Image (spheres, rainbow, N blue to C red):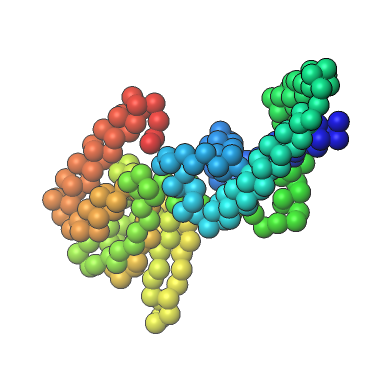
Amino acid sequence: MIALMTFLLVILFSIIVVRVGTVALKMTGLARDVAAFQAQSAFSGVGFTTSESEYVVSHPVRRRIIRILMLLGSAGLTSAMATLVLTFIGRTPVEMAFRGLWLALGLVALYVFARSKLVDRGLSWVIERGLERWTHIRVYDYEQLLGLSKGFTISQFKVRGDSWVAGKKLRDLKLDEEGVLVLSIYRKVDGEEKFVGAPNGDTEVMAGDVLVCYGPEEAILNLSKRLKGVKGDMEHAEAIARERVREELRRLSGGYD
């Protein structure tokens, strides 16, 4: 019975390790279902080659978590198989049937434990509090959060004297209608560089400023080249129209991917 109990404990340990891995990956910015799938894949060593897997291993913190899960999974599966063999080897048919019954009951109990939403919430809360206290695992992948791999970018450009944006307030430029947000401005004041973070609508853009913008890469590029005058105003109107079309397409597709 010791071998049987050891086998069940190994399975329980595996469930908890996968749960820890799921919470750890979730704390790095992954969605819950993605984190659970990747943690289970790494622990079992099945090696699914999906775009999500490639994205996970490209992140240094997540890659470390995956490596630990693979190491523990290799040891856990080997131990489980060994103890399972020892549970039945050299036993009489009656003993094997008796142990098989206990094994089935134990696996059912572990399955209920693993599938319980109440247990999941409680265990996840404990694991997350523990990881926050004893590790520095909570990181934010700004590439994912800002959608930088989906056509959006953070870029900067210097405002020339003949630029369409020069001499205007951000409120009047209405760049948000083009899908562009001005995150910050660098400008020279009395020979010293001044940083304006999260500028408001009353902030005036001046020639020589360096604008740090977030939005579609093409939109920011076009904005950086836009000149003053009627042509610039027309390009602004066209950019707004393109952004409205993009918004409508996103709405119809049901998301922003």
**Residue furthest to the right:** 1
The image shows residue 56 at horizontal and vertical percentages of 49, 48
The image shows residue 59 at horizontal and vertical percentages of 50, 54
The image shows residue 42 at horizontal and vertical percentages of 56, 43
Tell me the residue at 34%/66% (across/down).
210
The image shows residue 4 at horizontal and vertical percentages of 80, 31
Of 125 and 102, nearer the camera is 102
Of 236 and 23, nearer the camera is 23
Residue 134's image quarter?
bottom right
> Left or right: 202 with respect to 59?
left
Where 150 falls versus 253 (above or below)? below
> Left or right: 8 with respect to 156?
right
Q: Quadrant of the N terminus?
A: top right
**Residue furthest to the bottom:** 191
Q: Quadrant of the C terminus?
A: top left
Of 178 and 29, nearer the camera is 29
Tell me the residue at 38%/60% (across/down).
212
Where 223 falls versus 162 (above or below)? above
